[in-house]
Amino acid sequence: MTEIQSFERSLRRSRESLTREDRPSTFTLCGREWDLLNEVFAPVYSPSTEIALRFLGLDDTVPAPGAGSFLEVGCGTGVIAVMAALAGHERVVASDISPRAVENAAVNAERHGVTDRLRPLHSDLFSGLDEGDRFHTVFWSSNYVMGPAEYMYESVHERAYVDVGYRAHRGYLDQAPRWIAPGGSALLHFSDRGDLAALHRMAEECGRELRTLRTARVHEGVYGDDIVTHMLLEIVPAAV
């Protein structure tokens, strides 16, 4: 599949997921019920949220106190952030560029009783954070399909599927390590449906290296005939 085909297919998936007759208002994941608001990325149409939970060890509901602080960039429905709070992270920030997604994360935090330690935040990457904020884990399950730099988004929902010119990826590679606490990790969930070579080039330009921590091969597509490799990457300073 060419890059343009992948880009255009992702945009179609974005538009279709908003209007599908079977789009639910609630869904089940990790044995829990979640609210899904209109205009928010639907985890039921993609395996990425479930894979991210496995990568992070958050698919297990057994809490592990003392897990530290957790920032999720691009929280969508808030599933990952809520599961982080349930797993023992004492301070969680669920941020998203979509106001509707921030609202959705707040609804699910209320549903699962973690509003005391989870803060929904409207933010473009790290723009909404306080200058002194630091986190033990910074995580983004990215919109890894690259779109042409000249493309103009027709909705904020399209941003969950496509990153034009990889502008958000460049910003994340550059900025994420600045927000981690001592001993913390800046993590990126990516896939080979994205341009991994371009990602590594950008990392190098930002003075970063990417370390692959985990991978998973998944059957995707309408008929499950697309085999996609997902990966959890750690962003670290480049060796001098």
Image (tube, grey):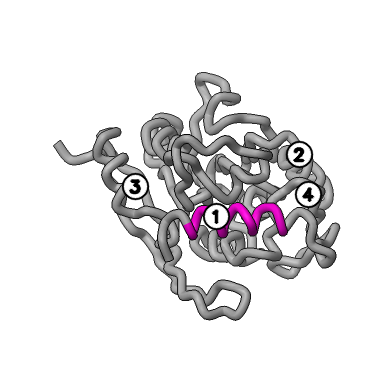
Residues at marks 4 and 2, CA–CA distance in whole angstroms: 12 Å
Q: Residue at x 61, y 30 (%)?
A: 123
The kind of secondary structure the magenta stretch mainly shows is: helix
Helix, strand or loop for disc 3:
helix
Query: Where does the image place residue 115, in percent across and percent down from the top left?
Result: 77, 40
Q: Earlier in the sequence, mark 4 or mark 1?
A: 1
**Residue 9 lies in magenta, yes or no?**
yes
Residue that mark 3 sits on: 199
* Foreground: disc 3 or disc 4: 3
Q: Which mark is residue 108?
A: 4
Image side of residue 117 versus residue 25, left or right? left
Tell me, yes or no, if residue 15 can be seen here. yes
- Tag 2: residue type? Arg
Residue that mark 1 sits on: 8
* Foreground: disc 1 or disc 3: 1
- Tag 1: residue type? Glu
Foreground residue, 42 or 159? 159
Q: Earlier in the sequence, mark 3 or mark 2?
A: 2
